[in-house]
Image: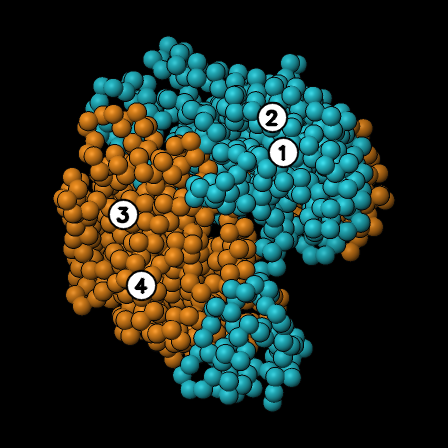
Chain colours: A orange, B cyan
């Protein structure tokens, strides 16, 4: 019995692999994997082999239990560009700058992620006062805090086990917070009823989205659940689908018409998908991420009609519902439009809508607060959902408290009202101004074309790349817009995400840029970007 | 074309199903599912059927997209007893009490879940002061707060984007918090090095456990990943394995020897499992949940040797590491024992260890703070892990801040040190006292036999149930210990979890009871439990 039944893979993929093991030095760096047909047969003999190789008590050198070759294959397929290689390089560059390495810039500007506070946006005072009171209730005796903040804190604490935000809450979320959420939705939707039983608090919107997708994923091969997502998309969706092993069905937004959604394109995409999977879900992001469009009421109605006709479960990602800037645009919730379409739709179409504390005027990403509302969900499935979320015990309670404040902010007549409104308005106005500025400056650059940033926090401009740049990128094994963004980062310190991370029409190139940096920094950044693009174009022409 | 190719299931499982839809009333309550061989063929005709059934624009009555029959089958298999039917009934009873319904008791005592604050345990003052300061940094100017609390808050805030805990952190967790964690581990383990790069902050320990299990789950049929878990177990494990579709391999703890772990039993269980799956993982909970045992150093060494010999990935759930009460017992971390066994083990055995802010003397469950340390993980797999966690952006930042405080509490000489130590010691002493009292009182009851509660927060006594009770339970379709616990709840208001929710040897019955209620309430509860058990035994004998 010799090594001949083992396949020797050499050299190892990563030099650090050799570090891992002790044992037989002669084999260091080589990777042993049994030939698969022999795997089961080998087992009794392998004990013998181990003894021969390693002697008495030494654990045999069999390599790791968990390697990239033996790990969950779905996880390997997961990609998440918003925190991908370009961001890792940005973090590295920041470290280099700290260590005194000379660069043609002094700081990295991270316009890759919708992280408002990191870009200097200030939290809402009232929210933070209440959170401090909830964290350390001794402050309730402090006359520095306004009465309404204290009352909110008392109400939240009363709803917590042992009056502590350190207690677990109900898995679906604290009752009174779910009531706040449901009143908020009713108010937002002009009085359409919202049952707190349909509200699930979540760990950010991502958690809710993944949970609903999980419920919906079944089948194998051609019966596998297909999920329609927009291209460009927010890569949480593609990542979750890869992990769950569901089939991603792409429908393309119409860049020429300001990233609008055409029902014909939905239909085309659906028909094509039916050849190889069972489409069951339609996901919409409105206002759009990464594309910044705001859907018209008519479009939403058409989408709902389409979902009803094609028997699709609707998922509406509405986390940017306060982020609407453009003249003539308004946020219409899927729930409201659904109910305005009358009972033949409102009593049948299954809808889950998601919201978060991370975006809008709050930008409280770190608290991981969120909720989802499920409409027309089968009661038995709802029971399964409630069971499923109970395994993770509960969403973070500080995030739940924050969600209570977002959905039940200071009211007219309360001491904190004026300041709350002033802060909220200032933040949203500032974002609106930056949205406009971003569009305007980008459109002055030959070779960059930017749709209006109607809402959300991003622009997703199209960039024209010279043929030679595309060739050079391919020679380096890089997607051309990654090549572009990486060069931009190295030369200017500006960190953007290549369009390929979100998906785009074959042969087109884009990047996603947040509008979140402070106005002056954003302006500098756009100027630098303009210069870079001109130089880049010249260099490769 | 008629209904004959459809299978009519009737009556519906739940009466509420009928409420869902409008449309053809004749079919209300009936459930249509196409016969499976015909599924694909039917598609074109079903359009016709819909038109015939529903007419023009009305969405056809096809039932829900998402039903229990068409949902993710793995999710259906998930069970989580700690928040199962008995707890749902307890919540209902609480509501009934509030509404004035007469019961033989005035309040529900929830001894079903390790939720310390809900049971009246007080948070550590220092932790909450720092959290309040982080939430509302204006308080840094307040001279009410001790300097060390302010310094900790400043340090945490400085490490946050925009100095706000509302910013996203790095997906692996805030750098300086991971450094605190690694110094804590080094100190705990007598100086054995800990690399902050091996630390991942998590959303409670559950999040980390599920993530590692996810990486390890592969294969189909007989090559499916098998995961060894103790019986009795904490049902997060069985739930996660069901959801992931991994194979649960049971090894039984030895109740006769104070719930100890026998290597022979591990071997037996492993050999049996190899017939139908590929065992790759061994999970240990120490101190034990639900069984409250503390493993000896020798036992841990034997387990590590076993894992090395059998090529298993070790998962050590060590969230109760401060909860050790019994004379002669001490907590030994798997990491420490592994490294003390010398490089032939410490450089090969793959280990993930989990900790949490929810247990020990903190009991801060609501913050969902946690960490895991991964040892000897293949660097490429680590890169995959980092990518995977980035999709959910980051663990809740308040929970990360709390973890920084737990692992870097006030030091001797700092203003908050004395109070911190006093509070921590009082809480742990109180728990030790209640552990002892629980064991003592339970063992006075004929028909209840309780092992010493050496650690953690639970006792898991064995109960003898009369034959007639077992028969009656089975007649009602209930597991006998569920029948027992449900009766206990209805008659006394005490909420425990039946042993069957954790797994137990065939023919034995147990319940899990936390030792968390305040001493006087715990005493009352144990007295009531004693009376109930005697009465129950009498009634069914």
Mark toward the viewer: 4 or 2: 2
Position of residue B252 measured from the top left corner of the image (x, y, whole percent): 74, 36
Check the residue under mark 4 and report the chain it is in. Answer: A
Could you say whether the residue bearing mark 1 is in a helix, strand or loop? strand
Position of residue A320 measured from the top left corner of the image (x, y, whole percent): 30, 56
**How far apart in space, not on screen, are marks 3 and 4 (Cα)?**
17 Å
Whether labels 3 and 1 share one chain? no
**Which residue is pictured at 52% across the width and 18% down the height?**
B430
Mark toward the start of the polypeptide (3 vs 4): 4
**Left or right of residue A241: residue B341:** right
Q: Which residue is mark 3?
A: A408
Q: Which residue is mark 1?
A: B512
Mark toward the start of the polypeptide (2 vs 1): 1
**How far apart in space, not on screen, are marks 3 and 1 (Cα)?**
39 Å
**How far apart in space, not on screen, are marks 1 and 4 (Cα)?**
44 Å
Specify the quadrant that holds the N terminus of chain A: top right
- Circles 3 and 4 in contact, beta carbons < 8 Å: no
């Amino acid at each position: 019995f010799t090594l001949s039944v083992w396949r020797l893979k050499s050299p190892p993929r990563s030099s650090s692999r050799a570090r891992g093991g002790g044992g037989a030095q002669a084999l260091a760096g080589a990777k042993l994997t049994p030939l698969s047909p022999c795997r089961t047969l080998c087992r009794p003999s392998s004990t013998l082999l181990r003894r021969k190789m390693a002697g008495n008590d030494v654990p045999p050198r069999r390599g790791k239990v968990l390697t990239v070759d033996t790990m969950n294959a779905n996880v390997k397929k997961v990609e998440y560009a918003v925190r991908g290689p370009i961001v890792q390089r940005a973090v590295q560059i920041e470290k280099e700058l700290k260590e005194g390495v000379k660069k043609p810039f002094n700081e990295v500007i991270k316009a890759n992620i919708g992280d408002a506070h990191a870009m200097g946006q200030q939290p809402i005072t009232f929210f933070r006062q209440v959170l401090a009171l909830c964290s350390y209730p001794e402050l309730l005796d402090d006359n520095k805090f306004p009465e309404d903040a204290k009352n909110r804190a008392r109400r939240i604490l009363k709803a917590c086990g042992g009056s502590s935000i350190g207690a677990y809450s109900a898995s679906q979320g604290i009752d009174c917070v779910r009531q706040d959420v449901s009143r908020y939705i009713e108010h937002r939707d002009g009085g359409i009823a919202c049952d707190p039983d349909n509200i699930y608090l979540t760990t950010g919107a991502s958690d809710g989205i993944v949970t609903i997708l999980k419920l919906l994923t079944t089948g194998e091969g051609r019966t596998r659940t297909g999920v329609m997502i927009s291209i460009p998309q927010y890569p949480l969706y593609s990542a979750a689908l890869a992990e769950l092993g569901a089939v991603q069905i792409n429908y393309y937004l119409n860049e020429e018409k300001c990233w609008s959604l055409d029902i014909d394109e939905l239909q085309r995409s659906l028909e094509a998908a039916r050849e190889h999977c069972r489409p069951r879900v339609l996901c919409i992001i409105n206002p759009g991420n990464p594309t910044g469009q705001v859907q018209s009421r008519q479009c939403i109605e058409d989408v709902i009609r389409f979902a009803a006709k094609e028997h699709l479960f609707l998922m509406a990602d509405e986390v940017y519902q306060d982020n609407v800037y453009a003249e003539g645009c308004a946020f219409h919730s899927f729930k409201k439009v659904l109910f305005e379409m009358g009972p033949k739709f409102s009593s049948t179409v299954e809808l889950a809508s998601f919201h978060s504390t991370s975006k809008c005027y709050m930008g409280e990403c770190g608290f991981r607060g969120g909720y989802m509302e499920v409409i027309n969900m089968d009661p038995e499935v709802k029971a399964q959902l409630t069971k499923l979320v109970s395994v993770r015990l509960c969403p973070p309670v500080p995030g739940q408290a924050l969600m209570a404040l977002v959905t039940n902010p200071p009211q007219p007549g309360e001491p904190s009202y004026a300041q709350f409104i002033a802060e909220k308005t200032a933040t949203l106005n500032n974002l609106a101004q930056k949205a406009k500025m971003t569009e305007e400056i980008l459109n002055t650059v030959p070779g960059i074309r930017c749709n209006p940033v109607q809402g959300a926090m991003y622009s997703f401009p199209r960039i024209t790349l010279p043929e030679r740049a595309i060739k050079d990128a391919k020679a380096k094994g890089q997607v051309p817009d990654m090549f572009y963004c990486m060069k931009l980062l190295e030369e200017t310190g500006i960190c953007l995400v290549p369009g390929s991370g979100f998906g785009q029409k074959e042969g087109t190139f884009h990047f996603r840029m947040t509008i979140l940096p402070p106005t002056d920094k954003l302006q500098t950044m756009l100027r630098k970007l303009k210069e870079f693009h001109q130089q880049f174009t010249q260099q490769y022409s």
